[in-house]
Amino acid sequence: MSKTKKITAAAAAIAALTLLAGCSKKAADAQFASSGSAMASKEMADINGKGFHVYADSAMEYDDAEESILAETPAGAGAAPAPETFERKLIRTGSIDIEVESLADARAALEAWTKRYGGYISDSGEWSNSLSITARIPSANFNAAMSDAAGFGKLRSKNINSQDVTEQYYDIATRLKTKRMMLERLENYLKTAKDMKDLLEIETKINSVTAEVESMQGQLNRLASRVDYATISVQARLPYKQTESGFVLPDARSSFRGFASNILEFFVGLLIVILYVAVCGVPLVLLAILLYWLCFGKIGLLRKLFRKARGK
C-alpha cells in the first residue's frame, strides 16, 4: 500500500510540473507577441513621423519613394482584385453591310434602333446611293443590337471583334491608386516642411505626380468608355444602278459625249507634239547640218587638219 501511494504521488507531481511548464510557455509567448506588436507600431510611427526627410534627407529617388509607399501599404490595400475576382473588360466592335430599298427608311430605322438600345450616333454620312452610321451602344446590348440591325435589309456582310483589355485596365487602375496615395503623402509632407529647399523639392514632386495622376485618369476614362459602350458601324446601300428616286438608266448621250471628247483630246495632244517637234527639232537639225558642213563639207576644217597631221 505504501508503494502504491508513492507511485501515485510521483505521477501527480509529474503532471503538476508539466502543467506549470505549459502555462509558463504560453505566458512567455503572449509577452513576446505583445512586445513585437508594440515595436512594430513604434517603427511605423517613427516612419510616419519623419516627414519628408524620409525621401529628401535620405536622398531617395522618385521610384524608391513610390516603392516605399507600396511597402508601407497594408496587404490588400490598393492592389488589384485577385485573378478569380476580375471583372473581364472587353472592347467590342462590330460592322454590318446591308442592302436596302430606301435610304430614308433605313436612316429612320437605324436612328430608332440606336435609341431603343440606349446608344447614340457618333458619326454618320449619306451619299446618292448609300449611307453609313457609327453608333455607340451599351456593351450589355451589343449582341441583341447586332442581330436586330442585320434585319433592316439584305445582309451582305457582318463582322464582330472583341479586344480583351482586362490586364491593361486593372494595371492602370492600380498604378493610379498608388499615385494618389503618394500625392496625399507628399501633400502631408508639404505642411511640415521646415526650410525652402524641402518646400521647393516637395512642390516639384507634387506637380510631377499630379500630372501623372491626371494622365492616368484620362487613360482610364477613355478605356472605360470604350469598354462600357461598344462601337457598331452600319453601311446601308441601294441596289446596283439605283438611287433614291429609282433605277438609273444608262446615259447614252453622256457616254457618246465622253467618247467624242476623248478622241478630240487625242488629236489635240498629237498636234501639240508636232508643234513641239517643229519648233524645237528643226533648229537642232539645221545646227547639225551646219556643223557637218564646217567640219567635213566644202570647208572641211577637220578634214584639212587630218591631212596636215598625216603629211608631217
Image (cartoon, helix red, strand yellow):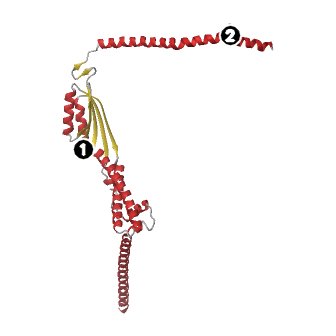
Residue linked to disc 2: 296
**Quadrant of the image containing the C terminus:** top right
**Residue kind at label 2, given as amino acid type:** Phe
Residue 141, percent across and down?
23, 41
**Residue kind at label 1, given as amino acid type:** Ala
Q: Residue furthest bottom?
A: 2
* In this view, 139 is above or below 182: above
Dot 2 crowding, Cα within 10 Å, few <14, some 14–19, many 20+: some
Between 224 and 202, the one lying in front of the other is 202
Between 87 and 203, the one lying in front of the other is 203
**First of labels 1, 2 by sequence position:** 1
Q: What label sits on residue 49 in the rendered view?
A: none
Residue 189, percent across and down?
36, 66
Between 171 and 255, the one lying in front of the other is 255
For mark 2, give the secondary structure. Answer: helix
Residue 145, percent across and down?
23, 38
Residue linked to disc 1: 140
Between 295 and 28, the one lying in front of the other is 295
Looking at the rendered image, the disc whose residue lies closer to the viewer, 1 or 2, is 2
For mark 1, give the secondary structure. Answer: helix
- Name the quadrant containing residue 237: top left
